[in-house]
Image: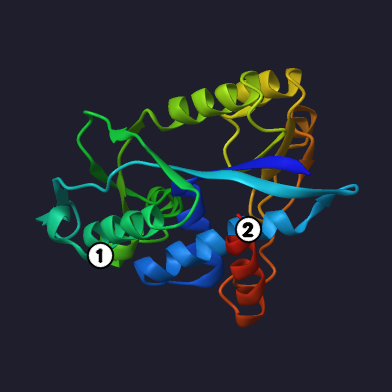
Amino acid sequence: MTKTAILIDGGFYRKRAHKLWGKKSAEERADELYRYAFRHLDKKDGPLRRNLYRIFYYDCPPVQSTVYHPLLKKNIDFGKEETYAWTLDFFNALKSKRKVALRMGKLSNVHPHYILSPEKVKKLCAGTIAVTDLTEQDFRISFSQKGVDMRMGIDISSLAYEGIVEQIILISGDSDFVPAAKAARRKGIDFILDPMGTSISSDLFEHIDGKESFTDHDPQRQRDTQYALKQEDRN
C-alpha cells in the first residue's frame, strides 16, 4: 500500500473546474473537488493500492477591497459581491470534509485592480475594435497572493524529509513547484502531476514521475458517488 498526499492549487483548480464543468454552488464545487481528488486513489502503482494520508488545499482569502472599474466608471465593493460570499462558503464546505487541510495565504499589499484581456488589447492597438466595443466581461480583477507557494513548498519538503508519505500528487498547472519536486524526488518520493487535462512543457517531465488527469466527466456524476463514499469509509 502506498501512502499518498494530494496537494491542490486552489486557484488553478477552481478556474479549471469552472471551464470543464461549469458554474456550481460553493457546496457543489467543494464536493466535486473532493470526489476529483479521490479519483486518484482508484489507480494502483503496480500491485500497490494508494491510501490517502491527507488532501492539502492551497488558496488565499477572497478580495474584499473596493476597486474602480475603468469601463463602468464606478467603484465595485467586492466585499458585497456574490463571489466573496461564495468563496467563503466554499472554504467552509471544504473544512467539513474528512482529511482535508486548508493552507491559506494572504493577499499582497498591492491594491487589486482591473486589467483588460490581452486579446482585447491587441485588437484595440490594431484598430479592429474601439473602446465602445468593450464589455464588462473583457476585464478581470488582478491581485497577488502571498505565502501560497511557500506553504506548498514547505509541506512538500516536510512530507518528503520526515518520511510521512511515499507519494505526492500535485493538482496544478504551475511550474513553480519544480524545486520542491526535485527535493522530494531525491528523498525517494513518487511525484505525480495532475494538470487537469492541460498541456505541460516537455522539460517538466524530467522533474516528475508521472502525469495523470481525470477530466473525462464531472466527478459529481452518479457513477462516482458509490466509489467516493467507499473511499470516505475506508479513510
Give x and y (percent) for residue 110.
Answer: 23, 30
Q: What's the residue at 37%, 28% (across, down)?
A: 147
Quadrant of image for the C terminus:
bottom right
Q: Residues within 10 Å of mark 1 (few under 14, many from 20)?
A: few
* Residue 209 x, y percent position in the rendering: 79, 35
Give the image quarter of residue 97. Answer: bottom left
Identified at 18% across, 52% down, the residue is 70
Identify which residue is drawn at 28% across, 44% down: 61
* 206 up-or-down from 31: above or below: above
Q: What secondary structure is marked by label 1?
A: helix
Residue type pointed to by label 2: Phe
Residue 151 visible, this orientation: yes
Q: Is residue 172 visible?
A: no
Which residue is label 2 attached to? 38
Which SS class for mark 2? helix
What is the CA distance from the residue labelled 2 to the residue labelled 1? 47 Å
The part of the image, by quadrant, that contains residue 38 is: bottom right
- Going by the numbered disc 1, the residue's amino acid type is Thr
Left or right of 29 in this view: 188: right
Q: Residues within 10 Å of mark 2 (few under 14, many from 20)?
A: many
Proximity of marks 2 and 1: CB atoms separated by less than 8 Å:
no
Identity of the residue drawn at 74% across and 24% down: 185
How far across and down, in percent of the image, does residue 106 sit? 29, 34
Could you say which is closer to the camera, residue 118 or residue 10? 10
From the image, tell me which residue sits under label 1. 132
Say which label, 2 or 1, has the lower sequence index: 2
Q: Looking at the rendered structure, which numbered label has been put on residue 104?
A: none
Q: For this view, does 134 lie left or right of residue 224? A: left
